[in-house]
Amino acid sequence: MKQVIFTADDFGLTPEVNEAVETAHTHGVLSCASLMVGAPAAGDAVARARRLPSLRVGLHVTVADGKALLPRVEIPTLADAQGMLPRNLVTAGVHWFFSPAARRDLAREIRAQFEAFRATGIKLDHVNAHNHMHLHPTVLGIIMRVARDFGAPPMRLPWEPPAGLLTPWLALLRARLRAAGIRHNDVLVGMATTGHLTAGKVTAALTHLQDGVTEFYFHPASRGTPDLEAQAPGYDRLGELEALLSPEVASALRDKGLKTVGFSDLM
């Protein structure tokens, strides 16, 4: 049994990202989008998602490299004076591991993001984290505890072989998800080519698709902007949108008798 999920991350980041998500779902093979509820264009993303009932939407939990949803006064160890979350992922991870106050602030922010998603009225298809920060055991534990109050949705396993130094962290994540009975993908395609998952790379991966659930994840946009380039330098967002609209990718899926699904569709 083979199942494939095509997900666009950073839904809500900018109008150009949102437009690409809508286009790729309406005219291409995109099945899912991961919503950043605190991002500048989140309201526009929610409006588009409501027009697209077949688009599966999940929560893209953001605890680093973005803007906090809560005001700094409520999460003083997590956000700076401008309400921005830490950009240095390593330093942030060490701080969260050793600071009880930081863990409390993390829990407040993560719960607020789940609450904000629920307030949209959109069905929660899945949960993952910006920059795969749920690989951090502290972040994962908080997300799993909070998610129980929101139906324990499926989660992303960010494993793309060979995983190298991430192998022990991925093994721990997989074990904790399985112990909790949380559904997840088996393989993730796009980590090694983040921002550059073009049509040729997608069709090559489909050729060697293994049994189980494979998620392909993208960062498309309808056009490049200075803001997007500053946030992720060098990303080929237009190339990734073209992959999602590619007749060759659609044909490769048909040849294998596959259609893209959402996490909530997993058997």
Image (cartoon, grey):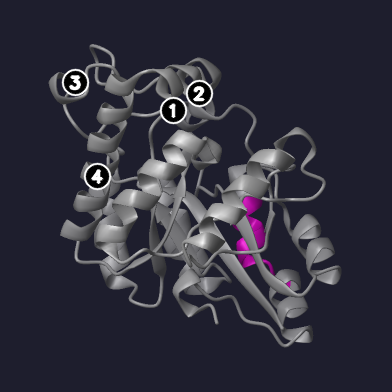
Say if 227 sits above or below 6 in the image: above
Please indicate, yes or no, whether residue 229 appears anywhere in the rendered image.
Answer: yes
Helix, strand or loop at disc 2? helix
Whole-angstrom CA distance, mark 3 to mark 4, is 15 Å
Q: Quadrant of the C terminus?
A: bottom right
Q: Residue at x 42, y 28 (%)?
A: 64
Mark 2 residue crowding within 10 angstroms, few (<14) / some (14–19) / many (20+): few
Kind of element beneath mark 4: helix
Furthest toward the top, the residue is 81
Which x, y percent locates residue 110? 29, 41
Q: Are marks 1 and 3 in contact (CB under 8 Å)?
A: no
> What is the spatial separation of the Cα atoms under label 1 and label 3, in whole angstroms?
23 Å
Mark 2 to mark 4: distance in Å? 28 Å
Q: Is residue 204 left or right of residue 80?
A: right
Q: Is residue 255 above or below residue 222?
A: below
Callout 1, which amino acid? Asp
Mark 4 residue type: Arg
Instruction: Check whether the beta carbons of the residues at disc 3 and disc 4 lie within 8 A of each other.
Output: no
11 vs 164, nearest the viewer:
164
Q: Position of residue 97 (x, y in %)?
A: 45, 24
Question: Residue beneath label 2, please?
Answer: 230
Q: Disc 1 or 3, which lies upstream in sequence?
A: 3
Secondary element type, mark 3: helix
Residue 78 is at least partly visible in this image: no
Which residue is denoted by mark 3 in the rendering?
A: 72
Location of mark 4 (residue): 111
The region drawn magenta spans: 239-247
Give amino acid for label 3. Arg
